[in-house]
Image (spheres, rainbow, N blue to C red):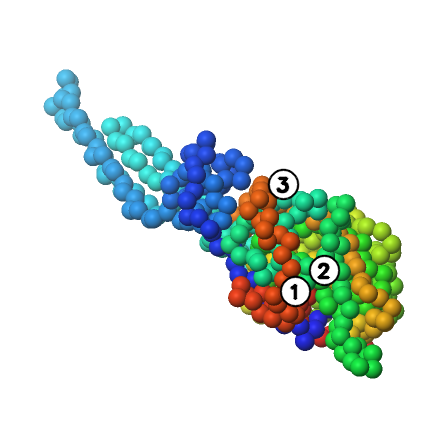
């Protein structure tokens, strides 16, 4: 699954293309939950706004001094009719100290002839190592289900990272690396380079499609039919710029002794593949069916404190963040990541792991088929709203008509690094080669 010869890539973060925001019908708010649809709460103005690029919301308001007003108590002394003794009532001044806060709650306490106004802080989430505080601003994450009926897949050369009108980016180096037909996305791994004697000297050309947005925590589900050839690995993973990674890798012959009823669940933390006490991060569940014979549903549920792999509705592995602690650090994927799907040649350098090598003289291409990609979170929100600024599905394709079918192969070659940071030919789950005995 890991190849030292494949360059890693850095995708530029989505940048807002406009600083303007439009107020919606319900304008008053205190949190994002007060705003309808995909709008969110501008904490500076306490107004609901449309903020598709994540530049308006989640901006903390300026802090202002809180003042406490204490009315002086007044004391009335009446002479008693039967005595010359005066009755005196003394009321002490009450002083209230108020912490600075972005949300005010006013409580009025009444006493005889004395009124005191105090400001108290609203309870906030308790953050810590297992529940880190969200970023500010949050990454912009698209909430949608992709059925591959009319996806907008743009070539890497033509993609501007600030665009929110794109669903996916083809970083394979050729428009021939994929096709969409009858609601199925087919990824095509193309043949390698051979020397004059017919010996394979490079790996097969991987096909990789990236989602055109980033996510920090959330649940992602795909329905895929894997390739049946040993050494051809069908993959679905998250990938961060810091090399945090969560993997589902499917091969019909891991280690040349685990058949097509197995798949690999794996994770990386800053490219580290082992945890405390040298425990390997990878695990191979036997799911009891041939992964390449039909479509099956694979799901990753990624939370701040645990990670779960699910196949056809059955939990096959759960990782608790607390169990990955090493000193003050956690070997756990935490950073903002992009979602990737692909097929790549593990048989060239990693045949001891992914099976193979592939006899490329028998094939003109090797395919993996994807039926849908569904992003879901708690409460059926597709990207975790605590950690992501959630935007809705793309609503138009007209602006992309000219570039949607562009063929980047004529403009760039495998291994080229583009101005937008993309490395052409990068395959899903890049990294160092791994060998098993």
Against 92, residue 180 (above or below) is below
- Seen in the picture, residue 1 relative to 337 is either above or below; the reply is below
Write down the quadrant of residue 191 in the picture. Answer: bottom right
Q: Earlier in the sequence, mark 1 or mark 3?
A: 3
Residue shown at 82% from the left, 60% from the top: 227
| Left or right, 94 with reference to 225 | left
Task: Please state the horizontal and vertical placement of residue 315, each as a whole percent of the image.
Answer: 76, 51
Q: Residue at x 78, y 74 (%)?
A: 348
Q: Looking at this rendering, what residue extends furthest in the top direction? A: 81
Quarter of the figure with the N terminus: bottom right
Q: CA distance from mark 1 to mark 3?
A: 42 Å
Query: Marks 1 and 3: CB-CB under 8 Å?
Result: no
Q: Answer yes or no: is residue 277 visible.
A: no
Q: Which mark is residue 409?
A: 1
Q: Residue at x 30, y 44 (%)?
A: 66
The residue most toward the bottom is 197
The reply to whether discs 1 and 2 touch (Cβ–Cβ < 8 Å) is yes
| Label 3 element class | helix
**CA–CA distance in space, label 1 to label 2:** 9 Å
Mark nearer the N terminus (1 vs 2): 2
Whole-percent x, y for residue 298 in the image: 75, 52
Mark 3 to mark 2 CA distance (whole Å): 38 Å
**Location of mark 3 (residue):** 379
Crowd band around label 2 with a 10 angstrom C-alpha radius: few (<14), some (14–19), many (20+): some
Mark with earlier residue (3, 2): 2
Q: Nearer the viewer, residue 369 or 180?
A: 180
Q: Mark 2 highlights which residue?
A: 176
Query: Where does residue 380 sit, x and y in percent of width and height?
Result: 64, 41
Residue 25 left/right relative to 66: right
Vertically, is 247 above or below 147?
Answer: below
Question: Splitting the image into 4 quarters, where does residue 359 fall?
Answer: bottom right
């Amino acid at each position: 699954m890991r190849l030292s010869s494949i360059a890693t890539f850095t995708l530029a973060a989505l940048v807002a293309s406009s600083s303007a925001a439009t107020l919606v019908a319900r304008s008053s708010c205190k949190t994002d939950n007060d705003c309808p649809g995909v709008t969110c709460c501008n904490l500076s103005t306490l107004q609901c706004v449309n903020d598709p690029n994540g530049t308006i919301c989640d901006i903390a308001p300026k802090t202002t001094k809180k003042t406490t007003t204490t009315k002086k108590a007044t004391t009335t002394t009446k002479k008693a009719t039967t005595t010359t003794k005066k009755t005196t009532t003394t009321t002490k001044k009450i002083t209230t100290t108020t912490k600075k806060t972005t949300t005010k709650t006013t409580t009025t306490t009444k006493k005889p002839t004395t009124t005191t106004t105090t400001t108290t802080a609203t309870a906030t989430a308790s953050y810590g190592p297992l529940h880190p505080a969200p970023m500010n601003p949050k990454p912009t994450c698209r909430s949608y289900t992709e059925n591959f009926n009319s996806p907008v897949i743009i070539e890497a050369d033509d993609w501007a990272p600030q665009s929110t009108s794109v669903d996916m980016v083809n970083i394979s180096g050729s428009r021939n690396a994929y096709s969409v037909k009858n609601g199925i996305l087919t990824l095509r791994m193309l043949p390698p380079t051979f020397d004059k004697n017919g010996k394979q000297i490079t790996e097969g050309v991987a096909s990789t499609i990236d989602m055109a947005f980033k996510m920090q925590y959330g649940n992602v589900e795909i329905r895929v039919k894997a390739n049946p050839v040993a050494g051809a690995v069908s993959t679905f993973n998250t990938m961060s710029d810091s090399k945090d990674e969560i993997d589902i890798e499917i091969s019909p012959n891991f280690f040349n002794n685990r058949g097509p009823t197995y798949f690999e669940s794996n994770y990386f933390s800053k490219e580290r593949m082992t945890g405390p006490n040298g425990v390997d991060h990878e695990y191979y569940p036997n799911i009891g069916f041939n992964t390449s014979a039909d479509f099956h549903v694979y799901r990753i549920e990624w939370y701040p404190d645990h990670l779960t792999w699910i196949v056809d509705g059955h939990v096959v592995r759960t990782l608790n963040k607390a169990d990955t602690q090493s000193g003050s650090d956690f070997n756990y994927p935490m950073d903002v990541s992009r979602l990737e799907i692909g097929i790549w040649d593990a048989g060239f350098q990693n045949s001891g792991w992914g099976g193979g090598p592939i006899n490329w003289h028998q094939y003109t291409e090797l395919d993996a088929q994807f039926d849908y990609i569904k992003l879901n979170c708690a409460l059926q929100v597709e990207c975790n709203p605590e950690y992501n600024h959630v935007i809705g599905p793309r609503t138009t394709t007209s602006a992309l008509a000219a570039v949607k079918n562009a063929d980047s192969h004529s403009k760039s070659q495998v291994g080229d690094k583009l101005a937008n940071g993309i490395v052409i030919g990068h395959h899903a789950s890049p990294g160092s080669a791994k060998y098993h005995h």
